[in-house]
Amino acid sequence: MPLGVFQRRRYGPIRCWLGIAAVVAASVFAAVPAADALDLLATHEVTAQFATADGKPMADAEVRVFAPGAPQTPVATGRTDAAGKFVFAADRDGMWSAEARSSDQIARIMIRVGGSSGNRGANPFLVIGALAVLLVAAFWYRLRRMQPPQR
């Protein structure tokens, strides 16, 4: 082989597809933060802490939690722990309200679950569109490589 001429190396189709899969996977991990990717389908675990007017925890108080848009029907009930904390699962974003009642006091709080739509990270449609463009480019490149060279 003369100097300056390189032998063209042929890779099998499995290696090509593995390379394409690696590029697509790297683009997905780079485009979508892990927290946002998991946040699309998950529920939020919310911890509310209740205290009396003088700042002492409301231990063993009865708690009712109300979802956004349904202030009359409690979606979760229970009792606070010794530190006045109550944990519940929120299945949607919005302003949730919770109310704790002890024998002599009532405490009400509002909790914002999720963020505004501007802070949600990458748009899923944008990510899917970018992946589709990468896939089309990979197929085009593969087809170009299969054609015999023109002389």
Image (cartoon, rainbow, N blue to C red):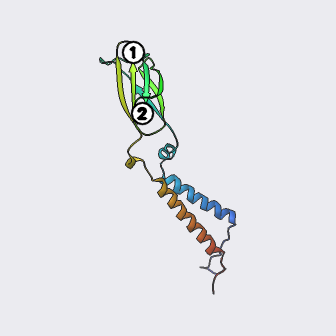
Which amino acid is tagged 1?
A: Ser
- The image position of residue 79, as x and y in percent, is 46, 19
Q: Quadrant of the C terminus?
A: bottom right
State which mark lies toward you, 2 or 1.
2
Quarter of image, res 19: bottom right
Which residue is most to the bottom?
151
Which amino acid is tagged 2?
A: Ala
Which residue is most to the front?
72
Q: Looking at the image, which is closer to me, 49 or 9?
A: 49
What residue sits 60% from the left and 68% below the top? 139
Quarter of image, res 56: top left
Q: Count the marks: how many? A: 2
Cα–Cα span, label 2 and label 1 = 23 Å
Q: Which residue is mark 1?
A: 102
Q: Looking at the image, which is closer to me, 53 or 62?
A: 62
Left or right, 56 with reference to 30: left
Eyeballing the image, is 72 above or below 146?
A: above
Mark 2: few/some/many CA within 10 Å (<14, 14-19, 20+): few
Query: Which disc number belongs to residue 70?
Result: 2
Which residue is most to the top?
103
- The image position of residue 93, as x and y in percent, is 43, 40
Q: Secondary structure at mark 1?
A: loop
- The image position of residue 65, as x and y in percent, is 43, 28
Q: Secondary structure at mark 2?
A: loop
Quarter of image, res 147: bottom right
Left or right, 20 with reference to 128: right
What residue sits 66% from the left and 63% below the top? 15
Mark 1: few/some/many CA within 10 Å (<14, 14-19, 20+): some
What residue sits 47% from the left and 27% below the top? 87
Q: Looking at the image, which is closer to me, 142 or 43?
A: 43
What residue sits 62% from the left and 70% below the top? 142
